Image (cartoon, grey):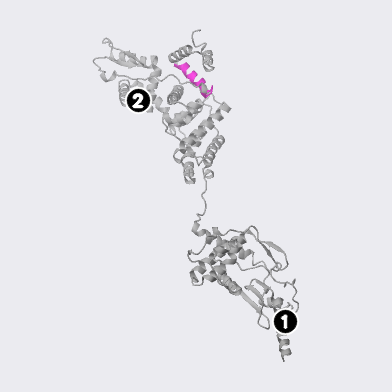
Amino acid sequence: MEPIDKQNIEAWFLDYFEGRLDPENKARLMDFLKENPDLLDKFLHDSQWMGSDSIVTPPPLKKFTSHCFRTYDERDYSFPAFHFDSCDYSFKKPECTPSELKSEILTKIYKNNKTDWENACIAYLEGDLSKTERKEFEEMLTVFPELNKDLSLFRKAFFIPEKVVFPGKNQLKKKRQGIKVFWSGVGLTAAAATIALLLMTGPQEPSPRTDKQIQEITSVVPEHTPTDNFKPEIGIPQKSPVASSNKATLTANLPTQSRNAESLSTLRPRSTQQIELADKSQVEIEPINRIYTAIYANMMERWQAESMKENKSLASALLKPVKALFGKAEESLPGHEPVSLWTLAEFTLKTFNTITDSDIELKALRDEEGQLKALAFGNENFKIAHLKKNYSAESENQKRTSEKTQNTQEITE
Amino acid sequence: MTVSEFNNAVDTYSDGLYRFALKMTEDEEEARDIVQEVFIRVWEKRGSIDGNKVKSYLFTSVHHLCIDILRRHRNHKSLDDIEEEPIIEPRNYTGLNKLLDAILKQLPPVQRAVLMFRDYEGYTYEEIGQLTGLSESQVKVYIYRARLAVKKKIESLEHVI
């Protein structure tokens, strides 16, 4: 193998990085680099651009130690154990002056072993020296103040952190959730929002009608024309340009959850519910309506559980249609006695008014014989009225019964 | 890692990361993108990142991104033409700081990175080795070489002056 020199070192580097050197020649190259620190720098620099796999571990740094200065004596001029770069130097030259000796040592340090001196300075400033080494190094600086100048240059090679502000800091930060919702308040919050939404978008859509108008509408229903297909022109009327102004203010002061009250989660909504309006059109119940109903039922259940503990049958009757709407099993309900639908309607509306602070009224229109003819509910802003189911047929049956009675009496007479 | 820990990490480390990326890439926009990128990575992996170890994750990621960019650009220049290098943030710089900043730009990327980890962030050789994937002895040698190069440049310029 050809000898290594500064002229062919590039080729040696290339062979090394491309893996063409055997261990023996690798060792030769390392020895050569050890003797030529300037080329070692170039080697390390080149290795950084050859990919991480090619980066080699440079030869270990030479350790600089000195043991001579503790015994230094101006009168003795002796440096019996100057240990530097694994070599011992002896300067027992009584014929020399102290300055000559110092000069000779400095020459050794700066020229023959400059790399080690530099490494010693860096190690000293980096804090890599042991306590003993550090003390010896400082003693050497005391003896050779000339070295301080070089050391001060090394001190300048340490960077002081400068203040730099990242401009996009606020954009990087993540915002927390705005409101912490506690489960205990979910029902109330949802109920308030849902009922308010329902009141603002649901019952207010029909045009406002007065009690007088309802009277007029119901009065046009001919008592003597009881046809099966007849439906009064009331119910959910067409939209009116009259704007509804009653913004529902919801104040729901509910009692605490009773043991009888059931969680909303147990109410299972049916897939789709259809409601037939007066004009036979089908309206699909929106999910929010079903949610509303469930929440309302829950509220009602709480309220009645607190205030009407003695009347469990009424509670059962109240809950039955609502739970049935959500597919609740009939047998899961407590036993109940029959309650008139009128009582149920009144109670429901009263509950609704209580929890929503509303003033909705339920009114009954009766005929000349005192029979229930039509029902209406609403307030000053909306009204919904409907003829009582089977009212005409009942009237006809009653008439027939009455006529039969009269005929029987006449026959008897 | 919680939202609070993430925001604390942004507050605590974004400046240092940006400074590191800025010194490495010498490009403000690129440095900003790198910092944003690593924080996005952290946020995406927040479930698996320990809040106490986020600093090393951030600096490791920034270092890798910077090295990748530098390898692509290969814009390393020689130490001989540092005087003409523009200074990134001229205000509040003393003369020595300007000089050091210019010299730093001329160091090989690996030396530059380990030197900044050492001086700016105060990492030990071992920690720098973990961040950069180098051995501890390699880190030490690179730092020593970098110090020597900086010292020599300062010395030569002082002679000129």
Return the x and y of residue A208 as percentages of the image width and height.
67, 71
- Which residue is under mark 1? A400
Type of amino acid at the residue the image marks with label 2: Leu
Q: Is residue A389 above or below residue B67?
A: below
The image quarter in which residue A198 lies: bottom right
Left or right side of A323 for A106: left
Of residues B87 and A114, the one nearer the viewer is A114
Q: Earlier in the sequence, mark 1 or mark 2?
A: 2
Type of amino acid at the residue the image marks with label 1: Arg
**Which region shows up in magenta?**
A37-52
Can the viewer see residue A391? Answer: yes
Return the x and y of residue A58 as percentages of the image width and height.
45, 20
Residue that lies at the very extreme toward the front in this rendered image: A412
Return the x and y of residue B41 as percentages of the image width and height.
53, 38
> How would you classify the magenta stretch by its main secondary structure?
helix
Of residues A104 and B115, the one nearer the viewer is B115
